[in-house]
DNA sequence: AATTTTATTGAACAGGTGTACAGTAAAGTC
DNA sequence: GACTTTACTGTACACCTGTTCAATAAAATT
């Protein structure tokens, strides 16, 4: 049995209404009542599908992180492992992806929004790294911990970027990232 | 003119009430009304000082990040620059700090809580790194971007730790961090 | 086309939110 | 100690929240 047509219509109406209201106010200022009024959906119906406005937004956000995975895997279409010394700034697609979905990431990173979306982004990047680097394990290093480190480091750059209102180009960040990753640890770097 | 005694009393009462309620329910489930009932403070008075329950919690959290700065600077009491090759797992105090304030960081990292506290933590660590590494600048690398990268990488490990309910020891994470930082970039590491 | 299933509606409830304002009381000032 | 300032209180209002339940209507099933 497929999903009921009524459910599809209701969700579609709620989705559209949320996007409409997002043009006017920030996510944390949007009430369930307002979305329902615009969507012409009973407020009780909203609760049959979601518990909060945030759950509705989460549905969008998951579509976006799916695109992130596609962007990431793009440079791997022809090789299976990218060694750092071969790493070309043009092959990194993460920052371009963020730039493409600026509108959404501005919401995701705004300070009153729950940290949940951050975790969704973190997990997506971490999973990509985990799969990616099965081949290049380091002795005495917990692989998962290493990927958490690496994944969140990249998000650190993105946070910085966001707080500067995405003022650098994605290309510039690509070059910077390659430089940072290529520092010989012997050159010293405190913790 | 010093701050009015009445303000001090009111804030103290609200602080205590919040701590009381935090033993029973999670931050996002606590209402302003409940805090005020417990603190025996009029709800209108709450709004004279704060806009949300979260603003009240933020006051605590800033005290805690102040302790983080002290913990961090501990190993630098005798030297001014720590070179990576000299870096000893015992000198890193960040993970111990988190362990000490587990109770608070469980709140800070819980998924319904606004991302604001994350930024407070991130900024604190980033500022520590910025000051710390003025001496060891790398050519062609934006120093601030590098510190954002490094600071958030460490938080990546902490997030992992949190999601495993702080099940490793701080010592273990110290050793892992030293291992990760010491990887020769030549050993290859994809993005 | 008739029947069954179920998503949606509308109304109602107790409680929370954010704001305003006049009255009170407690602090600071002289 | 009397005076002035201002933090706090109590009340009120419109709106939002989360939940319940019987009634309705729109799907799916036969």
Image (cartoon, coloured by chain):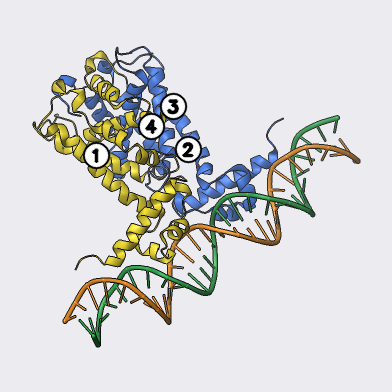
Chain colours: A yellow, B blue, C green, D orange
Q: Position of residue B1 (x, y in %)?
A: 72, 30
Q: CA distance from mark 2 to mark 3?
A: 13 Å
Q: Is residue B93 above or below residue A38?
A: above
Q: CA distance from mark 4 to mark 2?
A: 23 Å
Q: Which residue is mark 4?
A: A162
| Residue pictured at 42% horizontal, 66% vertical | A44
Say which label, 1 or 4, has the lower sequence index: 1
Q: CA distance from mark 4 to mark 3?
A: 25 Å
Q: Nearer the viewer, mark 4 or mark 2?
A: 4
In the picture, measured across the screen, residue A168 lies left or right of residue A76, that is right
Q: CA distance from mark 1 to mark 4?
A: 17 Å
Considering the numbered disc 4 on the image, is that residue within a helix, a strand or a loop?
helix
Say which label, 2 or 3, has the lower sequence index: 2
Q: Position of residue A118 (x, y in %)?
A: 34, 41
Q: Is residue B28 above or below residue B139?
A: below
In the picture, measured across the screen, residue B58 lies left or right of residue B188, that is right
Characterize the local packing of mark 3: few (<14), some (14-19) or many (20 or more) Cα atoms within 10 angstroms: some
Considering the numbered disc 3 on the image, is that residue within a helix, a strand or a loop?
helix
Quarter of the image where the C terminus of chain B is located: top left
Considering the numbered disc 1 on the image, is that residue within a helix, a strand or a loop?
helix
Q: Position of residue C26 (x, y in %)?
A: 75, 45
Of the numbered discs in the image, which one, if any, rests on residue B61?
2
Q: Which residue is mark 1?
A: A68
């Amino acid at each position: 049995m497929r999903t009921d047509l009524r459910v599809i219509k209701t969700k579609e109406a709620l989705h559209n209404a949320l996007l409409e209201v997002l043009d006017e106010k920030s996510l944390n200022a949007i009430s369930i009542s307002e979305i329902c009024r615009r969507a012409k959906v009973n407020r009780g119906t909203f609760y049959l599908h979601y518990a909060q406005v945030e759950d509705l937004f989460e549905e969008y956000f998951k579509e976006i992180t799916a695109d992130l995975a596609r962007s990431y895997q793009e440079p791997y279409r022809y090789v299976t492992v990218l060694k750092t010394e071969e790493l070309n700034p043009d092959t990194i697609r993460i920052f371009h992806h963020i730039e493409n979905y600026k509108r959404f990431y501005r919401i995701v990173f705004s300070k009153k929004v729950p940290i949940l979306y951050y975790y969704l982004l973190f997990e997506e990047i971490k999973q990509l790294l985990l799969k990616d680097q099965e081949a290049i394990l380091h002795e005495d290093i917990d692989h998962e911990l290493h990927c958490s480190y690496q994944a969140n480091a990249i998000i650190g750059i993105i946070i910085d970027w966001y707080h500067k209102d995405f003022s650098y180009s994605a290309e510039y960040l690509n070059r910077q990232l390659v430089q940072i990753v290529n520092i010989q640890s012997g050159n010293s770097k405190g913790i």
